[in-house]
Image: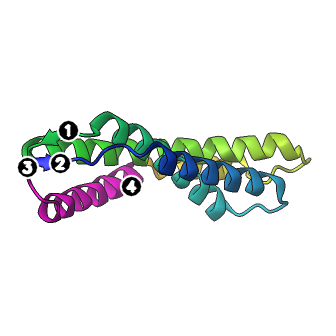
Amino acid sequence: MIAVPAFRRRIMRACLLATGALVFLWLRIEEASALLAMLGGWGVTLAVVIWYGWKALSERSLTVRQWMPIAALTGAVTGLAAAIVSVLLMLLKNGLHAHLFPDFPFEMMRAVLGFIPWWMMGACLVAVGMGALWAALVPRR
């Protein structure tokens, strides 16, 4: 059985506040880097997934057969959500800045949505690898 540690509210709240502050600062500055928008989408998504995933599995014991599918599904959902959140951040910045020519044209946003299958597969593989590493290194109950 794999033991999931107790949920630490203060640590996670600080991480969520830091993520929100970074996104807020990014929205204020005048730049149009798609890389920063996608990194912001990944950051927000990871913060939310870790918050709810850790909260849901806190203080439980899972077998490896239960652990690995949860890790794979969480990774796939994270990849899907990261692309959607990235596009939403781009839309939000376009709306806040309201230029004649938007910072992020719709073709760029469509291209980011085209990354969904790749991001889902990549995040799934990373999550399965991290789940296997966790299963191998964490003491069993």
**Is the Cβ of the residue at disc 2 closer than 8 Å to that at disc 3?**
yes
Q: Which mark is residue 107?
A: none
Q: Which residue was labeled with disc 3?
A: 141
How far is disc 1 from disc 4 in space, using C-alphas? 31 Å
Mark 3 or 4, nearer chain start: 4
Q: Which residue was labeled with disc 4?
A: 118
* 57 vs 119: above or below: above
Q: How many C-alpha atoms fall within 10 Å of the one at disc 3: few (<14), some, or many (≥20)?
A: few
**Is the Cβ of the residue at disc 2 closer than 8 Å to that at disc 1?**
yes
Q: Position of residue 127 (x, y in %)?
A: 29, 55
Describe the element under mark 1 as helix, strand or loop. loop
Q: Which residue was labeled with disc 1?
A: 60
Mark 2 or 3, nearer chain start: 2
Q: Residue 103's quadrant in the figure? A: bottom right
Q: Position of residue 98 (x, y in %)?
A: 88, 43
Amino acid, disc 3: Arg
Q: Position of residue 33 (x, y in %)?
A: 71, 64
Residue at 12% of width from left, 59% of height from top?
139
**Is the Cβ of the residue at disc 2 closer than 8 Å to that at disc 4?**
no
Amino acid, disc 2: Ala
Amino acid, disc 4: Trp
How far is disc 2 from disc 3 in space, using C-alphas? 7 Å
How far is disc 1 from disc 3 in space, using C-alphas? 10 Å
Farthest residue, direction right: 100
- Range drawn in magenta: 117-141
How far is disc 2 from disc 4 in space, using C-alphas? 31 Å
Q: Is residue 89 magenta?
A: no
Describe the element under mark 4 as helix, strand or loop. helix
Mark 1 or 3, nearer chain start: 1
Residue at 18% of width from left, 43% of height from top?
69
